[in-house]
Image (spheres, rainbow, N blue to C red):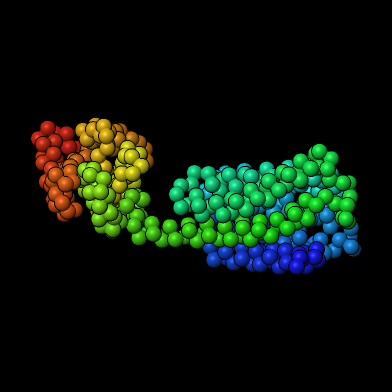
Amino acid sequence: MSLDQSTLEIVIMIVNFISCIVMITLWRINAGEKGPGSWALAAGTGTAAFFVMVFYPLIGNYAIFINNFGSLATYLFLLEGVLRFRGYKKESQRKVFIVFLLALFFVISYVNRDFPTARYLTYDIISFILLSLAAFFMLHKTHGIETAVHSISSGAFLLLAFSFAYRWFLAFSGQIEAVQVGSTQHPFQATLFLIGLPFTVGWTYGLVVAMIYRVQKRLIDIATRDELTGLHNRRSLDKNIEQIFRGSNISERHFLLLLFDINGFKAINDSYGHSYGDRILKRVAGDIQDSIREDDFAVRFGGDEFVVLMYYQSGFDMELMLERLREAVESKKILDGRQVQLRVSIGTAVYPDDGLSMDELLLVADRRMYEEKYRRQLLSEVTNSITA
């Protein structure tokens, strides 16, 4: 049994309407998030663009004009939503460009309303570009499970994008007739119409899943990340340490624990205020994160103390790594108009040589850190420097 054209149109109308409701709901639930507002606008515009074809018998090719303009606007709003969702800046500049493109789409759709081949040659290439860009930016700089999650919506974008590309090829090669309706249309027209179903379901479902994933990840980060610095917190360390031990035992690789604090940090808070001290902690955390490898584990342990766990690998030079971290943190930097040069003390412990538990390793590292602090005090190297 097959669906006739009118039944298929009703099904697609219902799917578009449901997509619109879902996107509006997603936007209202996540009102503070960037992206869902543009997606809701895209869903509403796309639904209206499809529904207007119901009035084709009454208004003729003006329905095609409105449909084409609304569809191009839909893909543009989808792309803008993706850019906002992925954190791309310059929104105000893009707004001006969006207005320009909407005006261009309006003119193109109006001029080509009576010329199917010309319409396909312009409408399809624009649609291909917008949808391909949306797919690209949805996947750009994603990793692991995030890539898989974002692939759902990206796959839907590419499905329709390449469908339009194929119809553009048919129009360019003269294989699509210069008629708009009727039995003489190219068979791919019906296929493209049908592809609208998985496209609508795919991008709606995919973007909802992407938003759920982001919210879930943020909740996990709230529980396991230090709010001030963005590094792992003590809870995250406690949660992951057994896995780190297990990985070290399985791979028979030692790992190094670094414990360090900022010398004289209390004096900084007393002299310049806790807000300034917080900015220094954020800067130090950034220096640490920029100096370690991707699979190393950096933790704000508490106050001005930080912990870094790193696996020994072939060619690993512990002294070189310590020097790199020390230089990064102690390098002169400008913060709120003041030149800052910090001093830190670092203690080390190696698993399993210095201990078989986290408490044992921290005890050894803490002792060595204070031994270094004492040595540097004797050498008068411990003082932080902050000058206007």
User: Where's the C terminus, which quadrant?
Assistant: top left
Q: Nearer the viewer, residue 172 or 74?
A: 172
Q: Is residue 103 left or right of residue 268?
A: right
Q: Residue at image x 43%, y 57%?
A: 217
Q: Quadrant of the N terminus?
A: bottom right
Q: Is residue 126 visible?
A: no
Q: Position of residue 209 (x, y in %)?
A: 53, 60
How many dots with numbers? 0
Instruction: Report whether residue 179 is seen.
Output: yes
Residue reaching furthest front? 1
| Left or right of 347 in this view: 241 | right
**Coordinates of residue 318 in the picture (x, y in percent):** 22, 35
Q: Quadrant of residue 42?
A: bottom right
What residue is shown at x 34% (from left), y 46% (from top)? 282
The residue drawn where x is 77% and y is 51% is 188
Q: Is residue 374 above or below residue 359?
A: above
Work out whether residue 182 or residue 130 is closer to the camera in this orientation and state it: 182
Q: Position of residue 3 (x, y in %)?
A: 76, 66
Q: Is residue 221 above or below residue 256?
A: below
Q: Position of residue 109 (x, y in %)?
A: 81, 48
Which residue occupies 27% across, 37% down? 313
Please identify the quarter of the rendering in which residue 330 is found: top left
